[in-house]
Image (cartoon, coloured by chain):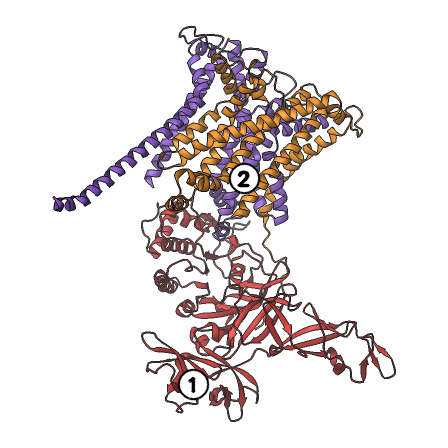
Chain colours: A red, B orange, C purple
Amino acid sequence: MNAENTIISLKNVCKVFDKSFTAVDDFNLDIKRGEFVTFLGPSGCGKTTTLRMIAGFDMPTSGQILLNGQDISLIPPYKRPINTVFQRYALFTHLNIYKNIAFGLQYKRVDDLTKPLKNKEGKLMLDENGNQLYEKRKLTKEEIRAKVKYALNLVDLEGFEKRAVSTLSGGQQQRIAIARAIVNEPEILLLDEPLGALDLKMRKEMQLELKAMHKKLGITFIYVTHDQEEALTMSDTIVVMSDGEIQQVGTPKEIYDEPKNAFVADFIGESSIFTGTVQKGNKIKFLGASFDSDPADEGKFALNEKVDVVIRPEDVIISAKDKGTVNAKIVSKIFKGMHYEYITMIGKNEMIAQSTKNFEEDSIVGLSVDPENIQIMKKPFTSNYYDGHLTKHCHVSFAGIHASFDVLKLFPGYHLSEEGTLINDKDEERDVEGLQVSVEVGFDDLELSDDPNASDLHGEIINMIYLGDHYEVTVWNQDVDEEFIVNTPDLWNIGDNVSLIIKEGGVEVKLKGGR
Amino acid sequence: MEATKTLSRNKGKVRETRKWLCMPYGIFLILFIILPILLIFYYAFSDPTTGLITLKNFKSVFEGDSSVTTFKVIGQSLGVAALTTVICILIAYPIAYILANSKWNKNVVLVYLFLLPMWINFVIRTVATKQLLIFFGLDPAMHPWVCSIIGMVYNYLPFAILPLYNTMLKLDKSQIEAAADLGASPVQVFIKTIVPMTVPGIVSAATMTFMPTMSSYVITDALSGRTIKLIGGQIEHQFLHSQLNVGSVYAIIMLALIGLSVVFENFFSEKKKGAR
Amino acid sequence: MEKELVMNAPNMEMEETNRSLQRKEKREKAKKAVALTFVWIMLLVMYLPIMYLILYSFTDANVIGKWQGFNLDCYSTLFNPKNAYAQQIWEAAWNTLWVAIVASTLSTVLGTAGAIGMHFLGKKFKAVFNFANEIPIVNAEIVMALSLVILFAWLKLPTSAFSLIIGHMVLTIPFVVINVQPKLEQMDPSLYEAAMDLGASRSGALFKVMIPDLLPGIFSGFMISMTLSLDDFVITEFTKPSEGTDFQTISTYVQGTLAKGAIPIQIRSFTTIIFVLIVAVMVGYTIVNNRKAKKI
């Protein structure tokens, strides 16, 4: 990437709150000058925290934020050429509109062209590029007045100077908040869900206006939202975030057409997601049938590899029974104006399809998908992995719990004594306490229960993706800050507190260090 | 990417400097509020001349004849406070009800008028009350209790009106109308819906009058010809005679009574919360 | 005949309804009259002592109750600099005023800073502070007064203007804090950040954005402080300067003269003047407020 063009770059930025909650994890991003970048993700994904670190309200726990190549991580917000539009506007109610907009201008310093800087010998001082340096001065009243007028013009609120904040509607307050930020001519404008409090019609209007304003001003916009449609409409680049990590960076089209993983696919637009198996001859098996896959994906995956398959509803072709790759039953039909939306069932799997053609509910139809519209992506992983150690009684301790496992598999030639210790044929005891191991628990080896007494392991559901015939649920345990991914047929709610039950024989333990 | 791996390490927090603003007040609280109260306990349990720990001060208050006086003083303090509180609420309740009822009164000026006398020095008002009572033939020397209670009620009535008025302004009118709609007579509506809904106001009006009346003594001194003795008066008496140690004993008695009233008040407001 | 009856029946019913409505309205009016009469009688009783003082400020009778004929002696002597009583009253009035202003100002500054600081403390520290702040509100004034006297005795310091101001601050600070606290809780935390975002330093953001936003709470805290301080007797009696000249505020002066016998007649004219001033301020305030309300 051309460094000249990069205005701000975040390098390995981490933010940990209260020593335990990781809000942003190893965030790396370069943003180009003049770009409209959107941080998109569900609430709590770390997007606002990242924005606040760029603004200077929070400081990274580790990592660097470089503005024009200079580290600004530790510089207070008032010294950064960056301004923010706040979610709830944060207008100063004790000041009128004029004074609100002029607030930042009173601190601004500009070159006083009548007072060139001279050194001790009386020579004119130049900067490294050979430009003349001048003494700094405050803005004059006339300059401030002109700038405020220009800013008010830009947001279409001419003549509002003397109004009180309380007399303005929500939309007008939002415009004033924008004017108050851009009047300072920041290099970067940060917008923290600025349209969240507006009604739908107003929001659509402001989206277009903001986009136009971005074009006119030519400065970098960093926009935070949880609304995928807003992100797709406005941005040059979208940064999809989840759990404090970047999931994908790309243009709206890239994000929509080529989601990198199931999370992105699920979050952006509607889609059906299945687990597939890669087969010979560039084919992929899912929904019990073999589909031709995109030639572009050939060779990217190993044979028999388990992958996530994403199908957009508009890419599903509905035809007569037995004319498609699979047969499906239409279980629901909704007229959406331009098209029908069908929910179809293929065995136990659900697929959403859109079509302009009319099919009857409960009828059997054939479904097919063009190879280039089958999005295949690597599964992030299929098991949970933890570091653990062995305890005295041949249990394994990991993620804050103790679990039993088949210890004899790990130490062939040994058997368990009556006291539960490990001995070999010669009656020699082996002390395994504290031995470091890696622990693997498969997504299918865990069960969820809403009975808090069902197990010692508890957590909160923080993410859930529907994968055709089951849900992939992420459970987070706050005490040990570990995540558990579970496959479950049941529908849970994000935010539910659940107990995790490990199935018999579900814990796989490997010794570390190749022993 | 040629990321320079120099990580800037810091606590990861923008230093919140504003919390230090409470330091001066913290010092003030410790020096002039907490330390003096601790000193009361020290003085109550120590010998005025030697400074050694002793129960002497308590004995002088609670032994022999003096205990009779002490319990009489405590009883009178509680009696005056309870009587004043009950009468204040009985008078203040209808006043607040009328003032807060938009059918009868739409003007806050009437409320202000009830509060206005508070800005006239209360000692002067008490003197005026005394002379007025004498003019009406009620001599404080002859009727110390009647005169004292009149003076107390007169002084603390605004403190009872205000919380009751504020509660009644927030009364849920739809509930009252619902009760009337369901066939309750006006008297039933009043007893079964309005009174229960105003319990928080009654509790805070009671606290606002009971607590200060229990510890006051200036009004009773003036309006009883110093015949009704209250704990406050005992503390003042000890102070005027430089008996700070014995005074501290009375102060502890007062603190205990205040503690009890706080427990009482919490009990009632908790009960109200639980009932919801 | 029969036909007519049928025709009239609904009309009669309507008349009946109308009549009962009128009766009900009359009853409502009567209720209102009774209610308002009660309120006005109570007001009259409340104002009786003050009216009595005002009335007798126009006669020079030593004992109230014996009208000596209309004259302005109370007033002329009050404004006679050579009159000993007048001198005492004005000195006490001046003392009352400056103590109230100094103590309330200090309380407002310390209490506002305290409330802001407390707002950003951790839960535990905040709870401790709130508890300590409640003590003077719940505690009896006389216990606070005695405890301060003991503090100064323990420090072997005589009571002085310093102890008096401290005493009045103990009385008033908690009320400043509890008046500022709700405003802090209502405040949008991004206001302070917005100010810094726009280039204001920490202190700039504090003084130009936060404090102005808290101003209504700070002002009511100051006003309550003034009211409490001006009216105070107990703390003043205990902590007032004990050495040098005889220091009196209006409260202690009147109480002192009452203990010795009758209070000076000039108190009547003094109170009348204060009362007129208060009423004038209240009327002015109400008018200004009403105008503001109408503007919006």
Considering only vertical position in the picture, is B71 above or below C264?
Answer: below
Query: Could you say which is closer to the camera, residue B164 or residue C102?
Result: B164
Q: Secondary structure at mark 1?
A: strand
Quadrant hosting residue A352: bottom left
Q: Which mark is residue A261?
A: none
Query: Could you say which is closer to the camera, residue A159 or residue C243?
Result: C243
Q: Chain of mark 2?
A: C
Query: Could you say which is closer to the camera, residue B22 or residue C200?
Result: B22
- On the image, the x and y values in percent for residue A130 come to 49, 60
Quadrant hosting residue A329: bottom left
- On the image, the x and y values in percent for residue B168 come to 44, 38
- Residue B252 visible in the snapshot: yes
Q: Residue at x 45, y 29 (%)?
A: B115
Q: Amino acid at mark 2?
A: Ile
Q: Residue furthest top?
A: C68
* Quadrant of the snapshot with the C terminus of chain A: bottom right
> Mark 1, residues whose alpha carbon is within 10 Å: few (<14), some, or many (≥20)?
many
Q: Residue at x 68, y 30 (%)?
A: B253
Q: Is residue C24 left or right of residue A60?
A: left
Q: Which residue in the protein does label 1 denote?
A: A328
Q: Secondary structure at mark 2?
A: helix
Q: Residue at x 68, y 32 (%)?
A: B36
Considering only vertical position in the picture, is B145 above or below A400?
Answer: above
Q: Amino acid at mark 1?
A: Ala
- On the image, the x and y values in percent for residue A16 come to 61, 61
Q: Is residue A374 left or right of residue A411?
A: left
Query: Could you say which is closer to the camera, residue A375 or residue B77?
Result: B77
